[in-house]
Image (cartoon, helix red, strand yellow):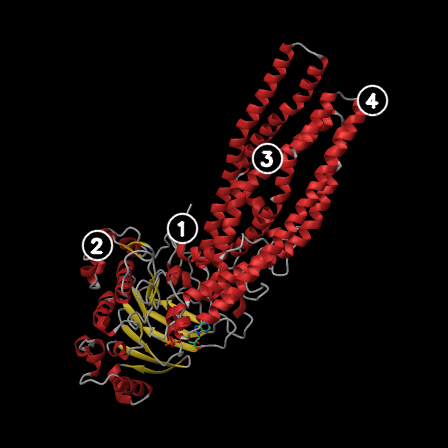
Amino acid sequence: MTTSDKSPGPDATTTPDGATTPDGAAGPGATTRPAEVAGPGATTRPDEGAGPEAAVRSGGTAPSGKARRPDGEVRPEEVAGPGAGDGGDRLPVAGARRTWAWLRGELRARWAAAALAVLVGAVGAAASVVPVYVLGTLVDLVDEGAPGSAIVTVALVILAGALIGGLATGPATYLVSRVCEQMLADLRERTVARALSLPVTALERFGKGDLLSRVSTDTAAIGKAASTVVPAMISSFLLGVVSVGAMAGLDWRLGLAGAVAIPLYVLGLRWYLPRAAPKYAAERRAVADNSQLLVESMQGVRTVQAYRLEGRRLHRIGGASREVHDISVSVFTLFTRFVGRVNRAEFFGLAAILVTGFFLVRQGSVTVGESAAAAVLFHRLFNPIGMLLFTFDEIQAAGASLARLVGVIDLDPGADRVETAARPLRRPTPARSTSSARPAEPRDASLELSDVHFSYDGSPEVLHGVSISLAAGSRVALVGSTGAGKSTIAAIAAGILTPGSGAVRVGGVELAPDRLREHVAIITQEVHVFAGPLIEDLRLARPDASPEEAAAALAAVGALEWVTALPGGLDTVVGEGGHELTTAQVQQLALARLMLVDPPIAILDEATAEAGSLGARTLEESAIAATRGRTTLVVAHRLTQAASADRVIVLEHGRIVEEGGHAELVAAGGRYAELWRAWEARTPASSPRQAVTGIDLTRTLPER
Ligand SMILES: Nc1ncnc2c1ncn2[C@@H]1O[C@H](COP(=O)(O)OP(=O)(O)OP(=O)(O)O)[C@@H](O)[C@H]1O
């Protein structure tokens, strides 16, 4: 199974303040690009995230981490609630009870398959004990000098038992691992789906490294357990039960002698597990921290280079890796000491059986063959018991990983509001209920933000009652200095961020963020080019788009020419490891996706701001073509974008300070006029507006 391929926009979005680099460009070939479209119908490709996962894996030099406490108690960080982790910013980990409940629920849902697996396993275990049981009879027959025919019969029974046991093992393993794999696939799918449905602010707060290590390292730990450890454990357990039963069947005292080993095994486990659990937890944390550090360093590589932070980053990564290494070594040392205790238990168990058998044979209670069979039965348990004990930590690790994934599944989709609720914000205005159960449909493509307040987690409010209204089909530019709140407004209007209070309406109807995304598409500052054919990248916006429709969208934004000139045209493999696209080309792809999404409302957040001056003209034209006929909100860092809008809204410190047409505001001599003069001064040319974009804006300016 794969992740849903119908998840809307959020996966394709970026932080409102997007990581800008000193040179302002992500560089050719970079996977993350300075513009991104997300919106109605946008989808998640099954292969997405392969890169970061690989990065985490390559960083995860240590064996899969382990963290569950043996007694299944809830660790301090195992508090089901966002932000309740030990660092305050980790994704939550489900408690032991909740994890068991999840497991039980999943098994109940597959009870028939699970029961069949156990049944086949039990038959296999019973059949494989038969040869040892009968071996005792064979010894006695030989001892008594029985005829060859009797021995042949016993030998045939041994053969049949071994055959049935062997034949049943394969299907039993297959059936158990199939149930486990199905549960894992479901779990992985639901984890990714929930992560994608999380608000961007929540994802930022938790850190992508933690999420990636859960989806990769934790899933791998569970996957390993599901395919190998759990089936082996179940068959070992069944074999153990059947063998002890068989020993007791020979003579109860032999069974009791074998049972001498049990308390020793238990003591060994009780010695090991409490010591191992904190070490595994520390190892898991160290691996996650190391992953986070690596992901951050890779994602911020330009900033790292620009500020010459390579040495310091490498030093920190080296330190984190050393910590992982040291903890892993101490985990292994502990494990070898545990092995010694297991060997001791085996020795005492076998010795007890042999001594008991000796005396029982002497007093005539059992035969030599029966005593030998008991010893062999016990000896045959060495491997299964060792398997049970030595993989206990892997099961623990899988349990810890399971708790981490269940923690993500249980996350409240409105996780970013959990913390903001503690702050003195007005509650969001409840959506007006309609008389019928059906949600009201917007009557047109107008967009309205009404008295919107917003603050990022734990930070002071950044929007203080912003109200903006865009008539259907109009083009409005948001202008303001850095940090004024433009991108935040864009993200709220697109349904990426949820306002602390206030309302967002489309066509007069207040819509929740998820419904808002059905009507609004946004191009943000980062575009992710997914590895694969270019047409598939376009189909993220509309999965059923035909090559002709994709070509038409590309043509509309002026990109068809260069796409057809690519070696494979629409089928050229782009993204990580594929054909490298320029920043401007990537931005045009984002605009073509917007065309395919065909939303009534479009939001451009610096869609062209990162372009080099040579591509600026083309991109400006592409952006105008892509948004023609749509209600458009443009975050205009380049004031030429504002000059071409129907209306300009000037924002400062989270408040609207001016609003009106470009010419009107310039004439008014206020804040916009000030910004415009500064802009003109920065772009000396006979016709500043033309010089910046290469477009004669008087042609594109609407009639006023
Ligand atoms: N993810 C975030 N977490 C915390 N604070 C944030 C976050 N994103 C933005 N901010 C803060 O919110 C305020 C508004 O930021 P926003 O990015 O909306 O401004 P902007 O006008 O778009 O700025 P710019 O032109 O630099 O993009 C700023 O003070 C910024 O530091």
Residue kind at label 1, given as amino acid type: Ser
How far apart in space, not on screen, are marks 2 and 3 (Cα)? 55 Å
Question: What residue sits 21% from the left and 54% below the top?
Answer: 567
Q: Amino acid at mark 3?
A: Ser
Q: Nearer the viewer, residue 699 or 559?
A: 559
Q: Which residue is mark 2?
A: 567
Amino acid carrying label 4: it is: Gln
The residue under label 1 is: 4
Q: Is residue 446 above or below residue 143?
A: below
- Note whether ligand 1 is within 8 Å of mark 3: no
> Residue, x 41% and y 68% (percent of image)?
300
Q: Which residue is mark 3?
A: 235
Cβ atoms at labels 1 and 3 below 8 Å apart:
no
**Does the Cβ of the disc 4 residue fall within 8 Å of ligand 1?**
no
Cβ atoms at labels 4 and 2 below 8 Å apart? no
289 left or right, relative to 502: right
Q: Quadrant of residue 407?
A: bottom right
Distance between mark 4 and mark 2 Cα atoms: 89 Å
User: SS at mark 1?
Assistant: loop
Which quarter of the picture shows residue 623?
A: bottom left
Where residue 366 appears, as percent x and y from the top left, is: 77, 22
Furthest toward the bottom, the residue is: 669
